[in-house]
Image (cartoon, rainbow, N blue to C red):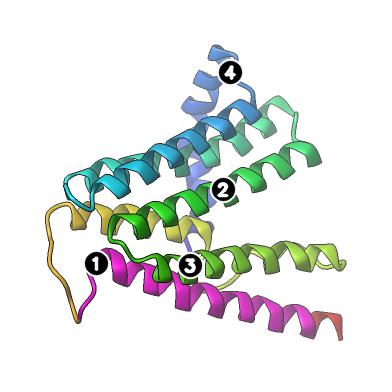
Amino acid sequence: MTLDKFRPVANRLLEPFVSGAMRLGLSPDAVSVIALVFAGVAAVTFYLAGTAPEWYLVGALLVLANGWMDLLDGALARELETASPSGDLLDHVIDRYADILLIVGLAAGIDAYGLGLAAVTGVLMTSYLGTQAQAVGLDRVYGGVLGRADRLALIGFVGAIAAVVQGTFFGLTMIGWLLVLFAVVGHLTALQRFYYARLALE
């Protein structure tokens, strides 16, 4: 399951947004920061959804905005021909903080901090193994069961449903099960990346 294969389609859809960002004088770094702001506000709405589930729908829309801005910063950098290692570093750091904010917000909203810890470590280890492969001389690894685009899509989808469907399923809410998925699949993806990186190095 990965949405990364649809990136060429997304790039075509981004063209008017790239033009708009250029007219506004936005830099790719500024777009990255805006994406982080969307993630931060989404985290707050997920926390509020613990007592008022309709906030999940607002959070889902903000997650969509975060993902769109995350695509836009790279497309804008390529159009302006300003892509650089510095910008790439900032983008990855902001993505990780955004991941942390979103998962913490989801976990805090249902008072499931243990699940949140398991989920966020799975997500961070997935990212770490992807970039660590590059650090030892391999290409950066993006493969795996669940990439960042997939996670954002799932958060948005499940968040939208959780706004109207409450209750528990085998003791967990839909958000709880989402965190379980991130924890299990995140660590499995990290181990998968580790395994293939080791094979490539032998």
Tell me residue 69's x, y (percent).
50, 36
Tell me residue 37's x, y (percent).
48, 34
Mark positioned earlier in the residue sequence (2 or 4): 4
* On screen, residue 79 above or below 137: above
Three-letter residue code for mark 4: Met
Residue 199: assigned label: none
Residue drawn at x 23%, y 49% as measured from the top left? 49
Residue drawn at x 57%, y 72% as measured from the top left? 144
Magenta stretch, overall SS:
helix
Q: Nearer the viewer, mark 2 or mark 4?
A: 2
Magenta segment includes 187:
yes
Q: Marks 4/3: CA distance?
A: 39 Å
Q: Secondary structure at mark 3?
A: helix
Mark positioned earlier in the residue sequence (4 or 1): 4
In-front residue for pair 157/128: 128
Mark positioned earlier in the residue sequence (4 or 3): 4
Three-letter residue code for mark 2: Tyr
Q: Nearer the viewer, mark 4 or mark 3?
A: 3
Tell me residue 183's x, y (percent).
46, 73
Mark positioned earlier in the residue sequence (3 or 2): 2
What residue did someone put label 1 on?
A: 174
Q: Marks 4/1: CA distance?
A: 40 Å
* The residue stretch that appears in magenta: 171-199
Q: Marks 3/2: CA distance?
A: 14 Å
Three-letter residue code for mark 3: Leu
What residue did someone put label 3 on?
A: 117
> Where, by quadrant of the figure, is residue 157 drawn?
bottom left
User: Crowdedness of circle 3 by 10 Å Cα count: few (<14), some, many (20+)?
Assistant: some
In-front residue for pair 199/33: 33
What residue did someone put label 4 on?
A: 22
Residue drawn at x 54%, y 80% as measured from the top left? 188
